[in-house]
Image (cartoon, rainbow, N blue to C red):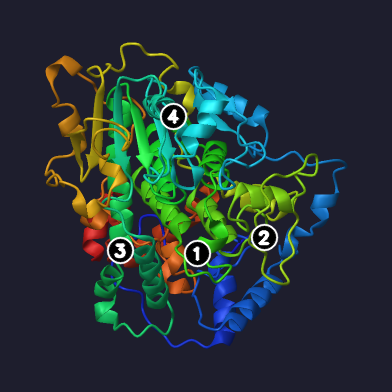
């Protein structure tokens, strides 16, 4: 059955007024859920649609809406008939980065010749929140890696996130563990890993200017409450209430910081280190956004899935805790904030992304109502233990891990990327952006080696990036003569004033001996001022079909239907004219202006 088309048209004027409030019972809400989601037939009903306060009502709404869909498939645990059709183990759609071969393949794909795959955490005895394998400098021994990681919070030492084709490296790590007492060899190993063979090193204070986890959670709760059908916000004050949630402000802050870091990575050859105390939340968000802004291959459907798997799943983002599945006090939907940031990029650069808004919605729903181990574990160790991945050897680290909620049944062999087991082929087709320009594919981007693309910085330069400005540092580590700026409380820092000019202007205005650096091809610098950041209406207001009017259709055929609808409206709105005027060509702009 064809999915129900959303109303409105591509060329229709989209109102910026708040959604029209209406009283709605839960019986009619179930129908609204199926109708609103029928606009794209995702196969999953998200808790984010209306966020009712009664969990039992949510469950019944999901069951009824799914039962009404002709394409409904069994949801709990993906116990689908498709899963048993193939004999033998199922090959994942993308590498899950659970083996050293997966990491080596990805390393070669990025062209990171000065890095290698380290198995030092193969038994999770360095850090249970880290993957079994990760990238370290080729010249660094595993024994040095083990000692160096012990001087970082939760054992999350510096490792490569992404190698830029021009030569720069983007690293991420936890905060310095200042209570440790490293010897000279350990300090030398830490500095070597942070520098990664570069003479120019920038330490990025990740959480600076970004909201705290508490802020993110509070803003999300306010947004959910505002989007309820029975919201107490008056219609004429709805937009002010939306601004008061601060959610869009936090999206704006993330995009601005990611843009600045993208400039740092692309403007010259250097090592850029993202440093966050826990290294499991905003480091992943910023690293992912930087790659989306700087690497066209990350904007493809497979590339984006690989990016999420590497920077979020394999890197140990605590999905189970942050999404509130366990009811822990550390709930904060950082991953949903990231998806909102990606949606903003889709709106500003519609031809640059191969995937569509509907893919983001499916991923959003899969996180809100998880049915695979991808989003039902906090660490790679927990995920691998549940799937039986470690049966081949004796586990050294045996600390307790989060248990699944009672009654939750999942298939441990499947990942969230097995879309064909939960979605029909028609639905998966809607994951592709019809406006994607193939000219922006990775093959048309700059080659792997461009010696003249970037210019090396001055020797032995160390910088702190904070508040949109670069501040020179005397040292990398906090264990020498004076403490590192990132190792002490931020209230003791000599804070630089917030610069009024963009980092791009600052970077290209640095000393002349650094050389001129033209804006590299493939780099996206999004806008983040005022109305450039918008509410993701198709996600947060899905339970209100009337709000969906005017949103463009996901397929070419849907766009054609909406165009026909607009043409019909133009015929109805066009003033009556004499018969002889029918033979004359009319200016469409004139017709529209006359119809107002």
On the image, numbered disc 4 is attached to which residue? 186
On the image, numbered disc 1 is attached to which residue? 6
Q: Residue at x 85, y 48 (%)?
A: 85
Q: Secondary structure at mark 3?
A: loop
Q: Residue 284 placed where, x, y %?
A: 45, 45
Q: Residue at x 42, y 38 (%)?
A: 172
Foreground residue among 107 and 139: 139
Binning the other alpha carbons within 10 Å of mark 1 as few (below 14), some (14 to 19) or many (20 upward) gives many
Mark number displayed over residue 257: none
On the image, numbered disc 2 is attached to which residue? 371
Binning the other alpha carbons within 10 Å of mark 3 as few (below 14), some (14 to 19) or many (20 upward) gives some
- Furthest toward the right, the residue is 87
Q: Is residue 289 above or below residue 376?
A: above
Q: Are marks 3 and 4 in contact (CB under 8 Å)?
A: no
Task: Examine the rendering and report whether any part of residue 63 can be seen.
Answer: yes
Mark number displayed over residue 574: 3
């Amino acid at each position: 059955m064809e999915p129900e088309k959303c109303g409105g048209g591509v060329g229709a004027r989209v109102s910026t007024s708040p959604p029209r409030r209406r009283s709605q019972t839960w019986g009619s809400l179930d129908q609204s859920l199926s109708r609103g989601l029928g606009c794209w037939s995702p196969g999953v009903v998200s808790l984010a649609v209306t966020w009712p306060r009664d969990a039992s009502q949510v469950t019944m709404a999901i069951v009824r809406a799914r039962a009404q869909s002709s394409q409904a498939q069994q949801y709990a645990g993906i116990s689908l008939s498709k899963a048993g059709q193939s004999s033998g183990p199922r090959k994942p759609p993308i590498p899950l980065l659970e083996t050293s071969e997966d990491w080596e393949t990805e390393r070669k794909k990025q062209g990171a010749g000065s890095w290698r795959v380290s198995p030092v955490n193969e038994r999770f005895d360095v850090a249970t929140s880290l993957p079994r394998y990760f990238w370290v400098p080729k010249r660094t021994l595993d024994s040095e890696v083990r000692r160096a990681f012990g001087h970082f919070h939760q054992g999350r030492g510096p490792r490569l996130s992404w190698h830029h084709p021009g030569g720069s490296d983007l690293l991420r790590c936890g905060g310095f563990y200042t209570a440790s007492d490293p010897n000279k060899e350990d300090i030398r190993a830490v500095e070597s890993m942070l520098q990664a063979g570069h003479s120019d090193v920038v330490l990025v204070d990740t959480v600076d200017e970004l909201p705290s986890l508490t802020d993110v959670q509070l803003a999300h709760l306010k947004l959910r409450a505002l989007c309820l059908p029975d919201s107490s916000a008056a219609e004429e004050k709805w937009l002010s209430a939306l601004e008061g949630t601060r959610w869009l402000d936090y999206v704006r802050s993330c995009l601005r910081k990611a843009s600045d870091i993208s400039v740092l990575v692309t403007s010259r050859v250097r090592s850029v280190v993202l440093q966050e105390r826990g290294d499991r939340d905003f480091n992943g968000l910023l690293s992912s956004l930087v790659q989306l802004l700087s690497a066209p291959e990350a904007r493809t459907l497979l590339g984006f899935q690989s990016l999420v798997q590497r920077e979020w799943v394999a890197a140990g983002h605590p999905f189970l805790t942050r999404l509130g599945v366990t009811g822990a006090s550390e709930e904060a939907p950082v991953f949903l904030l990231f998806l909102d940031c990606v949606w903003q990029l889709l709106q500003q650069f519609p031809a640059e992304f191969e995937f569509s808004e509907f893919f983001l919605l499916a991923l959003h729903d899969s996180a809100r109502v998880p049915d695979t181990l991808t989003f039902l574990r906090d660490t790679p160790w927990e995920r691998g233990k549940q799937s039986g991945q470690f049966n081949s050897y004796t586990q050294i680290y045996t600390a307790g891990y989060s248990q699944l909620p009672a009654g939750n049944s999942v298939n441990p062999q499947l990942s969230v990327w097995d879309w064909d087991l939960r979605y029909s082929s028609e639905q998966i087709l809607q994951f592709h952006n019809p406006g994607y320009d193939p000219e922006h594919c990775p093959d048309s981007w700059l080659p792997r080696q461009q010696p003249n693309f970037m210019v090396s910085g001055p020797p032995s330069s160390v910088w702190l990036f904070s508040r949109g400005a670069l501040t020179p540092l005397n040292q990398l580590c906090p264990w020498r003569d004076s403490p590192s700026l990132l190792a002490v409380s931020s209230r003791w820092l000599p804070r630089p004033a917030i610069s009024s000019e963009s980092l791009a202007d600052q970077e290209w205005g640095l000393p002349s001996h650094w050389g001129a650096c033209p804006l590299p091809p493939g780099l996206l610098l999004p806008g983040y001022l005022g109305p450039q950041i918008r509410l993701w209406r198709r996600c947060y207001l899905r339970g209100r079909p009337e709000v969906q009017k005017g949103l463009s259709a996901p397929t070419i055929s849907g766009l054609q239907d909406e165009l026909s609808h607009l043409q019909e409206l133009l015929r109805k709105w066009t003033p009556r004219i004499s018969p002889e005027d029918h033979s004359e060509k009319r200016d469409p702009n004139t017709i529209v202006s006359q119809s107002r």
